[in-house]
Amino acid sequence: VRTRSLRDVVSRRGGTFDLKNHAVTPIVNLARWGGLTAGVASATTPTRLEAAAQAGAVTDRDARTLCDVFAMLQRLRMTHQVEQIAT
């Protein structure tokens, strides 16, 4: 598996960065895995991450960090979408 740096991703996209595909989706997928590990099949991403921490699939600290980052990314995405509508 080849990991890509942020610079690699941005340079291939003409100076843009796709938050959904390169930041949000990996967190959502990790939360889905953690939720399934904890026996939670249907829930929000933060709920799945909390359940994963309670089940020991991820640390409490990692779950909190991922929840915080997820919320920040979602706010950033929504702000960008509102700006796109306004222009």
Image: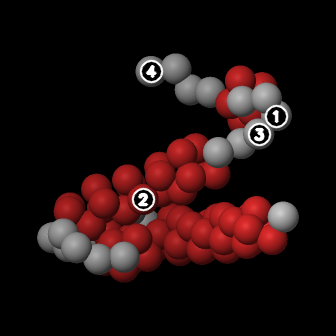
Of residues 47 and 10, the one drawn nearer to the viewer in this rendering = 10
The mark nearer the N terminus, 2 or 4, is 4
Question: How far is mark 1 from mark 3, CA to CA?
Answer: 4 Å
**Mark 1 vs 2: CB contact within 8 A:** no
- Seen at 43% across and 66% down, the residue is 59
Question: How far is mark 1 from mark 4, CA to CA?
Answer: 24 Å
Task: Work out which quarter of the rendered image holds the C terminus and state it.
Answer: bottom right
Q: Give the mark toward the camera: 1 or 2.
A: 1
Q: Of the numbered discs in the image, which one, if any, rests on residue 15? A: 1
The mark nearer the N terminus, 1 or 2, is 1
Question: How far is mark 3 from mark 2, CA to CA?
Answer: 21 Å
Q: Position of residue 5 (x, y in %)?
A: 69, 30
The mark nearer the N terminus, 1 or 4, is 4
Compared to 20, does 78 lie above or below? below
The mark nearer the N terminus, 4 or 3, is 4
Question: Which residue position is annotated with label 2?
Answer: 28
Question: Which residue position is annotated with label 4?
Answer: 1
- Dot 1 surroundings within 10 Å: few (below 14), some, or many (20 or more)? few
Apparent side of residue 87 relative to residue 36 in the rendered image (left or right): right
Question: How far is mark 2 from mark 4, CA to CA?
Answer: 20 Å
